[in-house]
Amino acid sequence: MKIVHLNTYDGNGGAGRAVLRLNKGLRNLGADSDIVCLYQFDQNSNVEAISSSVPRRLHALINILAERFLIKPFLKSNAIPFSLQRFGLSPNYLKILRDADIIHIHWINHGFLAPDQIRQLSSLGKKIVWTLHDSNPITGGCHVRYDCMHFKNECGNCPVLKRPGRNDLSHRTWLAKYDAYTGVKFDFIAPSTWMGDRTREASLAKGKNVHVVSNALETDVFRPTDKTSCRNEFGIDPGTVVILAGYMPSKSDRHKGFPELLDTLRHLAGRPSTDQTKYLLLFYGSDGSDIKFDIPINYRFVGKIKDDSVLVRLYSLADVFLFTSLEESMGYTALESLACGTPVAAFRTSGVTDVVLHKRNGFLAELYDTKALAQGIEWIIQQNENGDLSKSARDWAVQNFSLNVIAQRHLDIYQQL
């Protein structure tokens, strides 16, 4: 059985990493699995790019830029990612795709597969599955829905658009997707129970099978490392309480919950039991140049992390990983932290609830309740003195999200098809 995965980028972003990990897991089990991307960042990633020639690479770049910037005049703000989905580049000519038994679609925005190209895939006569790394495949354009329920019908009157209406851009995009999906037989795969439930409610998923299979993680790479040596490497005192967090203040990533993160830390610093001098917040994802926050505890930036071994050491030296996303299909960084034995404090929302188990490997506060989340950080620190939460976190990650476990669940679906 030959499996080919389609994703816009090779390892860039959460979906890109998920594809590489799944592909590796499938190969570990002896499966014939490969990846085709629109645009290749890493020439050593062993991924086939349809933009390998100069003309096609130029075409791909034009598509990417067009999809990212032409939509902006239509949006009220950049707070919610939204795709125009008018540009695409068909991969049907590739021999690797024509030889496939299973085509597995992943994240195909930014000019890879528009509805027309998805429809064209059916001409190859292959079995097709599609993993939802966000909500875009089941909406009229948005990637994060929050509480909007228009996806249950035919979209339209979109709260994201400057000119919402019955036949607005979201409705026209919905119609284009509906026409394409009607002509292609495929199954959806959701990486969390929450995403699976929402997909079954979606009008665009009517008549489609929906499977729930989490994304995979290399738990042999993301594993506990000696905390003392990790702290020595970063010059952190053994007695310091370290909170680790990703720095994601992007205007188009409002769903990452950065304002809520800062508010949580203010509540934590204001608690009577908190000794502010003993806390350190570590941010990864930025070097922090000229960035200042109004929070009453010490904080430090460690820059962008491109090496997983460095990221593992950061997770391992921390006492708590603070994850304040407002909506996630699953929550990869939370899972990485758990695999390294570091409990997670997060909001009880969306796909994160499949990863973080309340008071078993972390703490879940109700969405937007930053005061409760601050209490959760303190609870984790107090309850994990003997390491029980850390052991539970590691065990949960290995038993449920390791490469071979998740790859086998995907193989079962492929074989059913």
Image (cartoon, grey):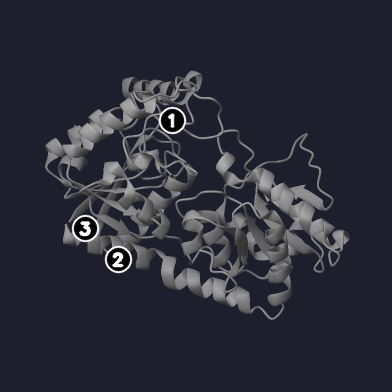
Q: Earlier in the sequence, mark 2 or mark 1?
A: 1
Query: Could you say where residue 253 lies in the image, as x and y percent from the top left?
Result: 56, 38
Of residues 168 and 128, the one nearer the viewer is 168
Residues at badges 1 and 3 in contact (C-beta under 8 Å)?
no
Of residues 71 and 65, the one nearer the viewer is 71
Q: Mark 1 falls on what kind of element?
A: loop
Q: Mark 2 falls on what kind of element?
A: helix
| Image point (27%, 46%), residue name | 205
Tag count in the figure?
3
Q: Mark 1 = which residue?
A: 158
- Which of the 4 quarters of the picture holds residue 287? top right
| Image point (40%, 55%), residue name | 21
Quadrant including the N terminus: bottom left
**10 Å neighbourhood of mark 3: few (<14), some, or many (≥20)?**
some
- Residue 395 visible, this orientation: yes
- Which of the 4 quarters of the picture holds residue 8? top left
Residue 414 — which label?
3
Vertical arrangement, residue 123 with respect to residue 186, above or below: above
**Real-space Cα separation, disc 2 to disc 1, in angstroms:** 39 Å
Quadrant including the C terminus: bottom left
Say which amino acid is labelled 3.
Tyr
Q: Mark 2 = which residue?
A: 408
Query: Could you say where residue 72 lies in the image, as x and y percent from the top left?
Result: 50, 22
Q: Is residue 123 left or right of residue 266?
A: left
